[in-house]
Image: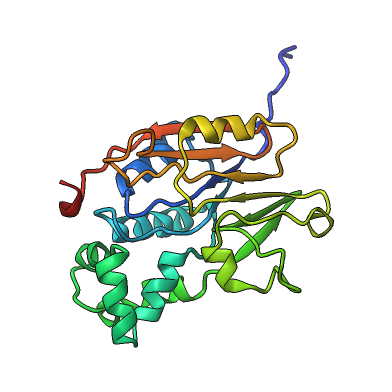
Amino acid sequence: MSNESTIISMPRKFVITDIHGCASTFQKLVVEELQLRTDDELYLLGDYIDRGIDSKGVIDFIFDLRDSGHHVHCLRGNHEEFLLLAKDNLREFQHWVVHNGGDTTLKSFGVETVKGIPEQYLRFFSDLPYYLEVDNFLLVHAGFNFNSHAPFEDKEAMIMIRNFKIDYDILAGRKIIHGHTPTRLAQIRANLEDSNAVEFNLDAGCVYHNVPDLNHMVALELNEWKLTTIPCVDEKSAEEI
């Protein structure tokens, strides 16, 4: 009988945000860098689409992960909200396409309107929740409006707010992890190392090829508090060239 101990790997919990159509980078991060296992938990904080060249590819990879038995939990970002609003409102459609990269999303699906996107994708977008509580963490796309009498019901804030003030009584010892605002890698790392910090932004601006110190995607493993980073490997969209 062998005296060697059997090493049992604990399930890991990864958080990724603001993929923005960077499907190749997303796949490289998950498959090659994280080597995601079926007993791991993957939490995605929204903004899967727009600006980058392959929004459909991002969602297809999420579907593939789920179909292969992986635990993938997805939240809503403001760009998913923009798409849903654009479905039946011409003004919202024009704003989404002209100002928020919706044209690249439509192109990736090979359609001209939101209604042309297959139903399984529209259902995915419409079913996305706004936040999750995982262990001692609150996961959300943008943040919370603690000036509201019901901050966990303020849906617009959860996908749109920036520079929000923390109410430590409401937070009750929990920590907030979010994205939404592109942030330099050095600042992300410094914040994660700050023992007094309770709010952590993981948006490293993957899709912003032309902005110094951005253009990365990161994953935070919650149990070991370990950050994995990779530079964007996706091609630039036409508007960035």
Measured as percent of width and height from the top left, residue 226 is found at 60, 31
Q: Can see residue 117?
A: no
- The foreground one among 63 and 177 is 177
On-image quarter of the N terminus: top right
Q: Can see residue 80?
A: yes
Rendered position, 2 above or below 121: above
Residue located 47% across and 76% down the image: 126
Quarter where residue 8 is shown: top right
Measured as percent of width and height from the top left, residue 87 is found at 34, 82
Residue located 63% across and 55% down the image: 139
Q: Is residue 188 left or right of residue 194?
A: left
Residue located 80% across and 53% down the image: 168
* Color theme of the render: rainbow
- The foreground one among 211 and 113 is 211
Q: Is residue 40 left or right of residue 46?
A: right
Measured as percent of width and height from the top left, residue 89 is found at 34, 87
- The foreground one among 202 and 197 is 197
Numbered disc total: 0
Q: Is residue 198 left or right of residue 49?
A: right
Measured as percent of width and height from the top left, residue 174 is found at 77, 50
Residue located 36% across and 54% down the image: 20
Q: Is residue 234 left or right of residue 17?
A: left
Rendered position, 86 above or below 67: below
